[in-house]
Image: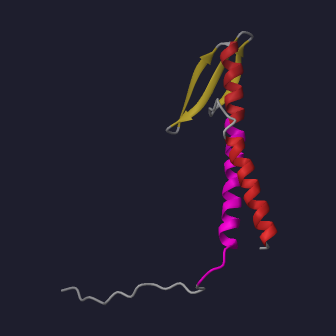
Amino acid sequence: MSDEEIKKLKSRCQELAKELGSFTLLSQGSVMPQSPTAWRWTRKVLGKTVSRGLSEEQAVLMKQAISNQRKMDAIIDEMRALTQKLIFALPQKSQSCTTAKHPKTRLS
């Protein structure tokens, strides 16, 4: 990988890190209408579905928090991929893997 490519990857990582700081509300789950004036927030907790009723104002905020969470997850996934590219672009000092040799022992 060229120095220019490495510089671009590092720059992209810095941009993504700045974006992470822009999220103030975060949540997982989904928001669905329950009736014309009521909403329901549903998520998984320890493998079980849990839900809670929401007001319209709460539903708007929860939808934004869920959207933020998804955006943040995508940013973190991209940062992981970029990090791995950067690390694997570094020259290796040794190509061989060595394993420690352990003396054989006899079981009696």
Could you tell whether 107 is left or right of 102 in the image?
left
Q: Is residue 68 above or below residue 108?
A: above
Front in this rendered view, residue 82 or 33:
82
Q: Position of residue 70 (x, y in %)?
A: 70, 39
Viewer-nearest residue: 66 or 106: 66
Q: Position of residue 98 (x, y in %)?
A: 49, 86
Examine the image and state in which quarter residue 72 appears: top right
Q: Quadrant of residue 24?
A: top right
| Membership of 107 in magenta stretch | no
- Find residue 76 and report its horizontal and vertical position in percent: 67, 49
Above or below residue 34? Residue 20 is below
Q: Is residue 73 magenta?
A: yes
Residue at 72 percent of width and 9 percent of height: 37
What residue appears at the point 66 percent right and 39 percent down from the top-left corner?
A: 21
- In the foreground, 65 or 90: 90
| Residue drawn where x is 64% and y is 20% of the image | 40
- Numbered-mark total: 0
- Dividing the image into 4 quarters, which one contains the C terminus? bottom left
Would you say 93 lies left or right of 32 here?
Answer: left
* Colour convention: secondary structure
Q: Which residues are magenta?
A: 69-93
Point out the residue furthest to the top here: 37
**Residue 44 shown left or right of residue 104 in the figure:** right
The quarter of the image holding the N terminus is bottom right
Residue furthest left as drawn: 108
User: Is the magenta region chiefly helix, strand or loop?
Assistant: helix
Residue found at x 71% / y 54%: 13
Q: Position of residue 28 (x, y in %)?
A: 62, 34
